[in-house]
Amino acid sequence: MEVKLISKSFEPDLTAAAAAVGCYSAKDPYSLLKKMDSKRAGEVLKVVMESGHHSVVEHAVFTFSVKGVSRALTHQLVRHRVASYSQQSQRYVRIEEPDVVVPPSIERDKKKKEMFMNLMKNIWELYKGLTNSKVPVEDARYILPNATRTNITITMNARSLLNFFSIRCCVRAQWEIRELAYKMLEIVKKEAPLIFKNAGASCEMLGYCPEGEKSCGRYPTLEELKKKAKSSTTSGGSINEGDASVFPVRSASCCTDGSI
């Protein structure tokens, strides 16, 4: 998998901050942007992001080139609807040789990998036999597996990216799209460090895990926090948000151990 940034909007952090200030200013957005600096943008975006007013970061847009991922990944990817996608067509691009993504659980087992690759070879022999016998490529592609590699262009605004990261950086996300999410996150953190300062899995931004019984256990669930808070109040103790024993502190290491 190879992920590269093709383009981004002008000064994403400053633009989003100027847009936020513009909602409460008589000045035009361009004038506000010209006077905006990183320090002021940081102050503005901190308030904006913590208050949940994320519409202003939609003005920051990023376009990525993604190479060598599976069709299984892109079927998941396009479920993120507020985005634009342009994918390599199996209707017009004839795939001459087996070019597939092998899952790690198969890759590390020599016998299983051999079985997997033999099947891929057989599929491609049939695929080429169909296309050579004048079956249209658009029809022959019906036998190609989800493992087939593809390339895709992705354009998302920052708000959509934050949502994408919150879901796909979670350890419960499928391994391949989680790897893609972390590669994209690494890129945008460099390009817009203020907007994506706390970006990552949901637990990173919320301070608790929203997955309930399916939680990986790295953060307490909301139900666990409620029970702990109730226990503290019934025992006569007092609670405040600075009490780390009840309210979790955001950790940069959560869900980022590289287990993809």
Image: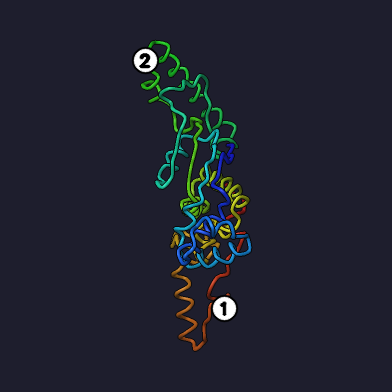
Dot 2 corresponds to which residue? 135
Total count of labels: 2
Image disc number at residue 39: none
Dot 1 corresponds to which residue? 243
Comparing 173 with 167, the one in front is 167
Q: CA distance from mark 1 to mark 2?
A: 68 Å
Q: Earlier in the sequence, mark 1 or mark 2?
A: 2
Tag 1–tag 2 contact (CB < 8 Å) = no
Query: The N terminus is located in which quarter?
Result: top right
Place of residue 251 in the rendered image (x, y in percent of width and height, measured from the top left): 60, 64
Place of residue 15 in the rendered image (x, y in percent of width and height, measured from the top left): 54, 55
Give the structural element (helix, strand or loop) at label 2.
loop
Q: Which color scheme did the rendering employ for the protein? A: rainbow
Comparing 130 with 77, the one in front is 77
Find residue 79 and report its image quarter. Answer: top left
Q: Is residue 147 visible?
A: yes
Q: Amino acid at mark 2?
A: Val
Residue neighbourhood size for the residue with mark 2, other residues' Cα within 10 Å, grouped as few (<14), some (14–19), many (≥20): some
Give the structural element (helix, strand or loop) at label 1.
loop
Q: Residue at x 52, y 86 (%)?
A: 238
Q: Is residue 172 visible?
A: no
As drawn, the residue found furthest toward the top would be 133
Comparing 84 with 8, the one in front is 8
Q: Amino acid at mark 1?
A: Asp
Comparing 63 with 219, the one in front is 63
Place of residue 19 in the rendered image (x, y in percent of width and height, measured from the top left): 49, 58
Find residue 249 and report its image quarter. Answer: bottom right
Q: Residue at x 59, y 53 (%)?
A: 192
Task: Note whether 215 is above or below 187 in the view shown.
Answer: below
Task: Note whether 23 is above or below 129 in the view shown.
Answer: below
Q: Residue at x 45, y 16 (%)?
A: 128
Residue neighbourhood size for the residue with mark 1, other residues' Cα within 10 Å, grouped as few (<14), some (14–19), many (≥20): few
